[in-house]
Structure formats: structure tokens, C-alpha cells
Image (cartoon, rainbow, N blue to C red):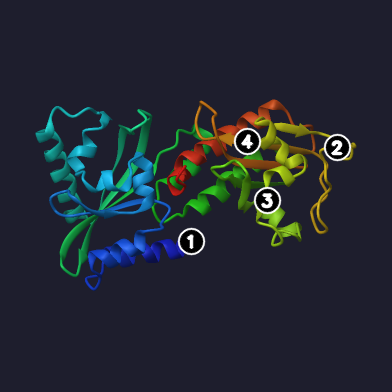
Amino acid sequence: MGQSESKDLLSSIRNTTSKTPQKYLKIIENQIDAIALLDTNGVYVGFNNAFAHLFGFEDEEIASLTLINLFSMSFDPPFKDQNDIFETIKQRFQTAISRGESNYQWKYKNLDDDPLDVYVWINPVHLKDGLYYQAILRTVIDFDTKYSKIELLIAKPEISIREIAMFCLEEAVKITKSTMGYAYMMDKKQEKLSSICWSANAMKNCKMLTKTLVYNVEETGLWGEAARQRKPIIDNDYSKPNPLKKGYPVGHVPIIRSLNVPIFNNEKKKRIVLLVGFANKEEPYTDKDSENVAKIMGEFWKVAKSQFKF
């Protein structure tokens, strides 16, 4: 979904009185951002898949929760008691009514006891049968100063996850001084790679991009070795013979040097979630390049993971 489409969606579900809650929930069902609909008492009317996945709950578990239950999971700042939580929720709802939006950052722990930091936007939604509140959540990433533009993008709900992915990939291309890059998502079984995005230069010069968007890991050449070996793979002389290389299709940009990096779901590194690759840096690739890539794309995954149920 592009930026203009995202804006249209957000506008339509905030400001219409023609939709029922059921129609609203149908609209948000497959959105990448975590979105929930609440009544004026803070009770969940419904939510999308991304919302349930973000918290680590099964759908039926969240259906029995209220905002008070979820806010009790907060750890920064911790709430004194349920009255404290209730007053906070009431204040944020009132702000949403008076200003049209209430936004803040919220830190909590999910069911796996992992600390998470999210941006939250609460908006009044006037539906056919009355007033509701829409809550949009997006994970905050912890970049240092040079990545501040990425963080600003994430703080805007109208920017799609795909647009953030493309921006992060382009930043990684710049930092590694590559001429092109790509990002693929790994499936739960660790068997298939599905294309997320390619850098602008790759899109411009590689003529085979529309041919294959999903690959079997075992059938890939050297670029898939980073997934098979579960570690970054650097090749600073692609012309050198290597039994792992299977060549590249007609129309593919010639490769001089390559860097391929697996991105893991968390620090325990049990599962690869992304495979990202870069090519044709003028100087040899180094371990520092792979570290920078892992940082940028790893933080991106913290934002994007609510789309995928693993």
C-alpha cells in the first residue's frame, strides 16, 4: 500500500458514519499496522491480526481483555493501581476527542516477557451506531542519530511498512557503499524466500525482477548460502569459480562483489526472518558492513514483524 492509499484508508475509517463496526473491522483486517477498535469504556470491539500478533496473544485471549488489562502490562512508567490506569485511559480518550488524536509512546512486556516500545495513536471514530476509538500501534526502533529519518517515518501512521522497508534498504545500500540491494522474507519453515523489495538502482538496471518473486532456499546459489549457513557471506571476487555459484539469469546485473546477511527474529537467533543482500561495492566488503546491515534491517524487523505470525 502506498502513502496516498494509506492516508485515504485512515481518513475513511476515522470520519465516516456510514460503516458499522463489522465493516470497519473488515477494512482493517489485513492492515500491516496493529489496529484495534474500542468502545467508550475501553473494551475491545475488535482488532486485526497484527494487533494480536504484536502482543503475542491468541485472538480469543485478546477478545476477553480491556485496555485496563493491557495497560497493567506496562513497565515504564509502572501504574500504581487500576484507578491510575483508568484515569490515564480516560484522559487519553478525552484528548482524542478534543484534539482529534491522542498520541504517545508506551513501553510494556509481551507474553514472552520481551520489552517492547510502541507508538500509539488513538482517534475517535464515528460509526453508524455511535462513537468508538481507533488505536493504531507501531513498534518504536532504537536507531542512533544518523538513522533519525527512519525513526521519523515510523512515527507516521500514513507511511506503509513497505515504504519503510524500501527506505531502510536504501540506507543500508548507502552505508555499505553498494550499488544495489534486495530484501527477502523467510517463511516459518525456513524453506522459502519471498521478495519484499529491491533498491531503486536494482529495479532500474536488473531486467529479470518480474520473473521470480519466491525461491526455495535449497535451490538458490551463493546468495542463499547466508540462509543455509545462518551467517553473513562475503564474496569479494565474484568472478572466481565456486561450486556454490549457479550463475544468474539473463538480464541480471553483473555481480563483482556481494554481501548477504541473514536477519534473525531476536537475539537468540533461533529463526531467520529476512535475507538481505548487497552488491558491487568498489572496495572489499568487511564484517563491519554486515554488522551495519544487521542493525538497520534487524530494527526494521521489529516494526514489520506484527504482519507475520510465526
The mark that comes first in sequence, 1 or 3, is 1
Q: Residue 158 appears at what percent x and percent y?
A: 41, 56
Q: Which residue is mark 2?
A: 243
- Give the label, 1 or 3, closer to the camera: 3
Circle 2: residue type: Pro
The mark that comes first in sequence, 4 or 2, is 2
Q: Which residue is mark 4?
A: 262
Mark 2, other Cα within 10 Å: few <14 / some 14–19 / many ≥20: few
The mark that comes first in sequence, 4 or 1, is 1
Which structural element holds mark 4? strand
Q: Residue 124 appears at what percent x and percent y?
A: 21, 58
The residue depicted at 40 percent of the width and 39 percent of the height is 140
Above or below, comparing residue 235 to residue 27 in the picture: above
Q: Image quarter for residue 186? A: top right
Q: Image quarter for residue 220? A: top right
Which structural element holds mark 3? strand
Q: Residue 113 appears at what percent x and percent y?
A: 35, 28
**Any mark on residue 161, and which?**
none
Circle 1: residue type: Met
Which structural element holds mark 2? loop
As measured in the structure, the alpha-carbon distance from the residue carrying label 3 to the one carrying label 4 is 15 Å
As measured in the structure, the alpha-carbon distance from the residue carrying label 2 to the one carrying label 1 is 40 Å
Judged from this view, the residue extending furthest toward the bottom is: 18
The residue depicted at 13 percent of the width and 50 percent of the height is 41
Does residue 178 show up?
A: no
- Seen in the image, is 157 located left or right of residue 288? left
**Any mark on residue 1, and which?**
1
The mark that comes first in sequence, 2 or 3, is 3
Q: 261 or 58: which is nearer to us?
A: 58
Q: Which residue is mark 3?
A: 215
